[in-house]
C-alpha cells in the first residue's frame, strides 16, 4: 500500500510483512532543511498510524546531507516516534555518496544514544539490497 509518493520520497506499507519501505530520491539534492523536516514528519505520522515492526530505508539515491544540528532534530522529533511505533529492526541500503552515507549513519548513531526504550531497535547498514531485506526477517 502506497502511503507517500512525491519527488523526494516514496513510502510503502506491506501489512502482511509488517514492513515499511522508505525510499529517498535523487531530487533530495535540491531539498531544503525545512522540506526534509516536513518529509520526515509525514513519515513519522505514518509510522505511528501503521506501527510496522520492520523498516527498510533505501538511501542509495539520496543526495541530501543531514548536518549535525539537523541530526539532533531528527533524533528528537522522528527517531522517538519510530521507537514509539514499535519498530524492531531497521535496515539501511546506504548511499554511494560517502558524505550522505556518513550523515545517515551519524543520524542513526544519535538515535542509538538517545533512544531509551525497553525494546531497542536493531539497526544495520548494507550496500546490497537483498542482504538488507533478508536481514529484516
Image (cartoon, grey):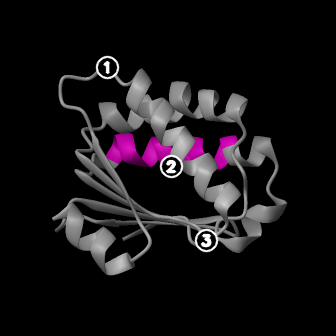
- C-alpha distance separating marks 2 and 3: 23 Å
Rendering coords of residue 117 (x, y %): 26, 23
Query: Is 37 positioned to the left or the right of 114 in the image?
Result: right
Picture disc at residue 96: 3
Between tags 1 and 3, which lies in front?
3
Query: Label 3: few (<14), some or many (≥20) within 10 Å?
Result: some
Q: Secondary structure at mark 2?
A: helix
Magenta segment: 37-49
Residue located at (44% from left, 72% from top): 127
Q: Secondary structure at mark 3?
A: loop
Residue 78 vertical placement versus 91 (above, below)? above
Q: Nearer the viewer, residue 72 or 12?
A: 72
Residue 72 vertical placement versus 25 (above, below)? above
Q: Nearer the viewer, residue 63 or 28?
A: 63
Q: Which residue is mark 2?
A: 43
Residue located at (72% from left, 64% from top): 63
**First in residue order: circle 2 vs circle 1:** 2
Rendering coords of residue 31 (x, y %): 79, 56
Q: Main secondary structure of the magenta part?
A: helix
**First in residue order: circle 2 vs circle 3:** 2
**First in residue order: circle 1 vs circle 3:** 3
Residue 34 vertical placement versus 81 (above, below)? below
Rendering coords of residue 41 (x, y %): 57, 41
Picture disc at residue 116: 1
Residue located at (58% from left, 67% from top): 95
Amino acid at each position: 500500500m502506497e502511503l507517500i509518493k512525491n519527488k523526494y520520497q516514496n513510502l510503502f506499507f506491506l501489512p502482511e510483512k509488517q514492513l515499511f519501505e522508505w525510499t529517498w530520491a535523487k531530487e533530495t539534492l535540491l531539498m531544503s532543511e525545512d522540506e526534509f523536516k516536513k518529509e520526515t514528519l509525514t513519515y513519522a505520522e505514518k509510522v505511528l498510524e501503521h506501527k510496522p515492526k520492520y523498516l527498510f530505508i533505501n538511501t542509495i539515491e539520496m543526495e541530501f546531507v543531514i548536518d549535525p544540528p539537523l541530526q539532533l532534530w531528527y533524533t528528537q522529533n522522528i527517531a522517538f516516534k519510530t521507537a514509539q511505533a514499535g519498530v524492531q529492526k531497521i535496515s539501511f541500503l546506504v548511499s554511494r555518496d560517502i558524505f550522505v552515507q556518513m550523515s545517515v549513519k551519524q543520524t542513526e548513531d544519535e538515535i542509538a544514544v538517545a533512544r531509551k526504550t525497553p525494546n531497542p531497535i536493531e539497526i544495520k547498514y548494507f550496500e546490497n539490497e537483498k542482504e538488507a531485506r533478508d536481514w529484516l526477517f
